[in-house]
Amino acid sequence: MFKSCLINVSQSVASSSRPSLHTSAVLNARLSSKQARHEKISKVQARINHKLAFDAQREYAVLGHRPGQDHKWRSCALAKVIVTEDALYSDSVPEIIHSPEGDIELPPHLSFGITERSKELLFKVLPPLSAQEGVTKFSENVVSEMQEAMENEKAKANMFAKVIDLRNANAKGLAFENRRRCIRLFSPPGNPFDTGRPEIQAALLTIQIRGLWKHLLAFRKDIDNRRGLRQLVHKRAKILKYLRRLDRDRYEAILPRLGLDAASVEGELVV
């Protein structure tokens, strides 16, 4: 009897000393699982950091400046001359033209094809001539007729100003107006429509690239346009490298006007 009890006690002590039930084994298992979890988190974070670095390099090649340096684009000549959709609908302060007929309110941005000379002819020269033509003979009511004609011309001018508002144009009309402004800005004084200059070609490509980049930020799965963006970026780099070989001074002068850094168009471009 005593012998059997001694055997049972020895077996229970031996079973309690097995590694699977020891507190150090449990602690090691917990530490190994926690270490594995930390390693997994670190690998995921490393992949995220790698993707962020890759996206930053891609954004640098597309936009031409480092992330967080948007002031380079906002302060360049190209950004100041083009009209974006946000600026088109946020600018609500009209231009006031004072004339004998009365004040005429013009929209902040006129439609494509309306130059400064056309604006002066349409809203300063034409209304008084039309009012005088309406009163063809002198009579005792000539003053009242003239005032009535002037009021009619003022109403016509204000209505026509709303018609030629650039906000009435579609996306193609807005792109046409931006191309026209870009060509006038970067053309030489002697030839205001020299579209073959490398500066103009690079500026037009920059407008396309930024518009396509904004589209891809909203539609990230648009693979075809992403390929088109890559082609445009490399085409712009090729044109600017040609300009650098042609005239180094012109190359260094055009980069800040386009809001670009030299490193964004030289070397290997990741897009």
Image (cartoon, rainbow, N blue to C red):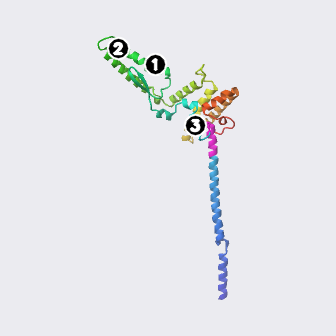
Instruction: Inspect the image, locate mark 2, and give the three-letter code of the amino acid beneath it.
Output: Val
Residue farthest toward the right in the current orientation of the protein? 245
Residue stretch rendered in magenta on the structure: 52-65
Residue under pointer 1: 121
* Magenta stretch, overall SS: helix
Q: Which mark is residue 71?
A: 3
- The stretch drawn in magenta includes residue 186: no
Q: Position of residue 42 (x, y in %)?
A: 64, 54
Q: Residues within 10 Å of mark 1 (few under 14, many from 20)?
A: few
**Can residue 239 be seen?**
no
Residue under pointer 2: 135
Q: CA distance from mark 3 to mark 2?
A: 56 Å
Instruction: Inspect the image, locate mark 3, and give the three-letter code of the amino acid beneath it.
Output: His
Q: Position of residue 13 (x, y in %)?
A: 66, 79
Instruction: Inspect the image, locate mark 1, and give the three-letter code of the amino acid beneath it.
Output: Leu
Label 1, secondary structure: give it. helix
